Image (spheres, helix red, strand yellow):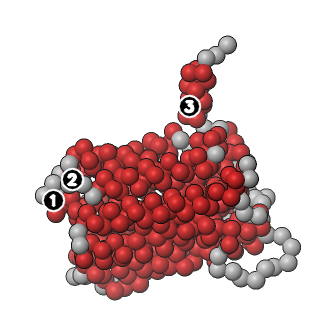
Amino acid sequence: MRTDRQVVAATWLGMLVPTPAVLARTLLTCYALSAALHLATISLSTLLPLHVVELGGTKTQVGLLFSVMTVVSMVVRPSVGGWIDRYGARPVILPGAAVLVGTSFAFHAVGTPTALIGLMAGLGLSSGLISTPASVLTAQAAPPEHRGEALSTYYLASSVAVAAAPPAAFALLQGGGMPLVFSIVTVLAVVIGLLAVSLPPDVRRTASGPTRRLRLWSRHALPASGVLILTTMGQSAVYAFVPLAVIASGKSALLMWFFGLYSSWLIVCRAFLRALSDRVGRAHVLEPAIAAFALGLFLLALPPTRMSLLTSAVLLASGASVMYPTLLALVVDRTPEPERGLAMGTVSAAWDFGIVVGAALLGFIIDLSSYRVGFVAAGIAAIMGLTTFLAMELPGREGE
């Protein structure tokens, strides 16, 4: 007879091995779509700021690169979710791949910062048309009891691509300049199109019955979207203001340690904790994840030392690694099948909205006061997100 310790060890070891159900052909295709898209978009996002400056652009124009892409993606995602409910994933992904091909070709032809900023709208549109259907299809194709693991694996693929894209982009830049980078992005866009075509024709679509009127969001996703907006405001602080704060303190050498540990630990947690929410419940994962993320933000308000930054990186990555996939799985669990695409599109748009608003709001707070106050504000926003989630879950717990 096995002891409790052996049972626990077997449970954790079991989570290291992917469940066969999350390695089905359709799901593997979705993981590949996520990886290819992020390789393309992150490579461009890494190098285009340098390209804008090289063309004589200003820091404001560099900022607009990301604002345009994020805003377009944010606006289009809920509508894309509704289209998936009506038409399925493949008819939405294929136009997204075509837009990405066209945008990557257009990058070869433009030579001004303003034109580059305009093309970021195409990048945002293609991202929304590809990533939203792929994530919705992942949630729909996975068995409900393995939905959390499938979504975590999907975002694990994107995390690995995000980590690999910057060094690969710089290697391409050195080897052939921006024309080679744009050409590789075109190749990746074609690969995305081929992957979309390879999706089996019998992939189920959720829409049935008479066509519904167009809606911009799903009410089933609004509480979770509120939680995500509040926590994502802090996420924007990690990339936007940690580098500036650490450099201002005169300890820029610590940045390599912080971001190196943050990225690697996030990937490790996503790999090892893929199936955790399927086994212990979504809420039991989300509550400590949001709390850990908030604590990591508060630690950033301390004078930067190697210990404080590394501890913060571990807490932030631990929370971020499971927060978004688990919240998505929770929304899909609680949304009627004909509306799941719209619900996931609503949640995805909430992520973008939190980044856009959070970066601007925290920047305003930091300008008025200090980096320390800005990080404290980000931590408070995350605590508000946790409080909102607890209030959202309270009625269900009272009924247990």
Q: Please name which of the two marks, 3 or 1, marks the residue nearer to the observer.
A: 1
**In front of the other: 45 or 77:** 77
| Residue most extreme to the front | 398
**Above or below for 112 versus 311:** below
70 versus 279 height, above or below: below
* Residue 3 % position (x, y): 61, 17
The quadrant holding residue 311 is: top left
Q: Is residue 290 left or right of residue 204?
A: left
Query: What amino acid type is highlighted by mark number 3?
Result: Trp
Q: Nearer the viewer, residue 265 or 106?
A: 265
Identify the residue at image location x=45%, y=74%: 70
Q: CA distance from mark 3 to mark 1?
A: 41 Å
Q: Which mark is residue 249?
A: 1
Q: Secondary structure at mark 1?
A: loop
Q: Mark 3 or mark 1: name the one nearer the start of the chain.
A: 3
Please determine whether, in this image, residue 276 is positioned above or below residue 37: above
The numbered mark at residue 304 is 2
Q: Residue furthest right?
A: 209
Q: Is residue 261 left or right of residue 304?
A: right
Q: Position of residue 312 (x, y in %)?
A: 33, 49
Element type at marker 2?
A: loop
Where the N terminus falls, by quadrant? Answer: top right
- Residue type for callout 1: Ser
